[in-house]
Image: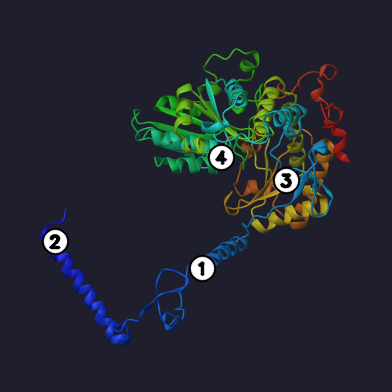
Amino acid sequence: MATPVHRRRLARHVRAHVSMQQQACYTTNRSCLSMPAVESNPTFNTPFVAGAQLRDTTEKPKPASFPYEGLYQHIINQKKGNKSYRYFRSITRLQDQFPLARCNETGKKVDVWCSNDYLAMGSHPAVIAAMEKALHTYGANSGGSRNIAGHSPLVEALEASIAQLHKKPAALYFSSGFAANEAALSTLGSQLPDCVIFSDELNHASMIDGIRHAKAKRHVWKHNDLASLEALLASYPIKVPKIIAFESVYSMCGTIAPIAAICDLADRYGAITFMDEAHAIGLYGPHGAGVAEHLDFATHQSGRANGRTAMERVDVISGSVSKGLGTMGGYVAGSTALIDMIRSIARGFIFTTVQSPAVTAGAHAAIQHQLHNKDGRIRLQRNVAAVKRKMAAFDLPVLPNRSHLLPLMIGDAELTRRVTDILFDEYHIYVQAINSPTVAVNMERVRISPTGFHGPAQQDALVSALVEIWDRLGLRKASDWQRAGVWDAQQAAVTQLWTDEQLGLTSGPASMSALSRPLQDVPVNGPLEATMLSG
């Protein structure tokens, strides 16, 4: 509170300031000493100053503002200059001719070899029927976030199916896989006191953002290097909360994490595990739960899980329904208390409108189908094995891995773009260039993703086109990359995670199932007739 002395000082200061202003006015414009007369406005009751229109109204030059548009264009030019600018191709998926699409520029059909809809679940009759029913029953919009009108029996049923799939007590559905990873990791890392997060160096951007937003201490360990991880874990007391964050299948290189060994380290050093199965859901395991389920294939197939399988040992599993399940959204699954905490705190969950009822119903139908049908993933894995064999026969440089992904190494951003352009323009084959910053400079590549509906003729057409382009451009072959030390002979000899026995390839010809026959001989349920693919 101001004292009387303070008030007197303030009054003197104000009077002095006014006096100085008047003096300045006198020396610069003497007319201000004689104020113009105030007259009455005949139209309005408010007075106006006569002669005001005679004042100097010349606009003073404004200071230059920040050149926003110039900066935007500068950044774009930089991206184009270093060949990392991203170009989009406009195509129309043909639902009844998967994996074909139509190029909207030329009107010609193209064979899509880079889709994440690995199992064509986005076109499956059961998924479409569920979505149509929900659309007509609930309408197009969910109504809001889960806190505001967006919660429904459809979401509850989907989350129950996710929990069942991963053998976890609870699950939480998000609008995307990115949102699920970011929200879950940022919440866990911020709520665990003095938490330290250990992140594989090739983790997805959504995981990296979640870890950053947690503002916890973090370490990056060498990709799939258990010694690197253990050295970091051992530098902290066992009582310090720790999170080991990793993926089951790494999308840009196709490598598979040593899940059981990571869980062993987590047990030894008092850490919890957070694993992203985004690119594995629907593609591995007897029920499509991912790589962790696949590691104990026979146990899960027989329903004799004992609490110590790899999938049950992982504390938190995140996943996507936007890839192998063919719809949209992501999720996390874990203990009841953990999921409830994320539901109650995660901003990426609380302040986001839930997916539409149609999408939610479609995701639920896709999971239910995968829980009871493994034919699609077996067909996919047979195609993957066939394409890898054909590429190896021509020394094409597929980065060795045990998964369904085929990263074809090129090592130059401009050449990578040329390869994809030639494939699209001359061979009507669509694959996407993978450049920096998604992968390191000089490690540019194209990532080829076979589906369950790429038959032998399409496989041969792809390999033939690649061989011709590699020869035309003088690109490095697999043997060249191996000599350069990018991978060694032992890595090149890795086998698929799916065994011949799991694929039904160990029986004699007379007893082999339909899944062991070529794709064009396998009847496909619904509109996806394999015979249409060559048309």
The local crowd at label 2, few if under 14, some if 14 to 19, many if 20 or more residues have their Cα within 10 Å, is few
- Comes first in the chain, label 4 or label 1: 1
Labelled disc at residue 178? 4
- Comes first in the chain, label 1 or label 2: 2
Instruction: Give the CA distance from mark 4 to mark 3.
Output: 33 Å
Residue at the image position 67 percent from the left and 28 percent from the top:
361
- Left or right of residue 505: residue 350: left
Instruction: Give the CA distance from mark 1 to mark 2.
Output: 47 Å
Indicate how the structure is coloured in the image. Answer: rainbow
Q: Is residue 534 above or below residue 506?
A: below
Measured as percent of width and height from the top left, residue 135 is found at 71, 32
- Comes first in the chain, label 4 or label 2: 2
Q: Is residue 192 above or below residue 252?
A: above
- Left or right of residue 119: residue 52: left
SS category of the residue bearing label 2: helix
**What amino acid is at disc 1?**
Pro
Q: Is residue 420 above or below residue 197?
A: below
- According to the picture, the residue beneath numbered tag 1 turns out to be 67
- Left or right of residue 386: residue 186: left
Give the image quarter of residue 142.
top right
Measured as percent of width and height from the top left, residue 350 is found at 49, 35
Give the image quarter of residue 495.
top right
- According to the picture, the residue beneath numbered tag 3 turns out to be 396
**What amino acid is at disc 3?**
Leu
SS category of the residue bearing label 1: loop
**What amino acid is at disc 4?**
Phe
The local crowd at label 4, few if under 14, some if 14 to 19, many if 20 or more residues have their Cα within 10 Å, is many
- According to the picture, the residue beneath numbered tag 2 turns out to be 6
Q: Which mark lies nearer to you, 2 or 3? A: 2
Instruction: Give the CA distance from mark 2 to mark 3.
Output: 86 Å
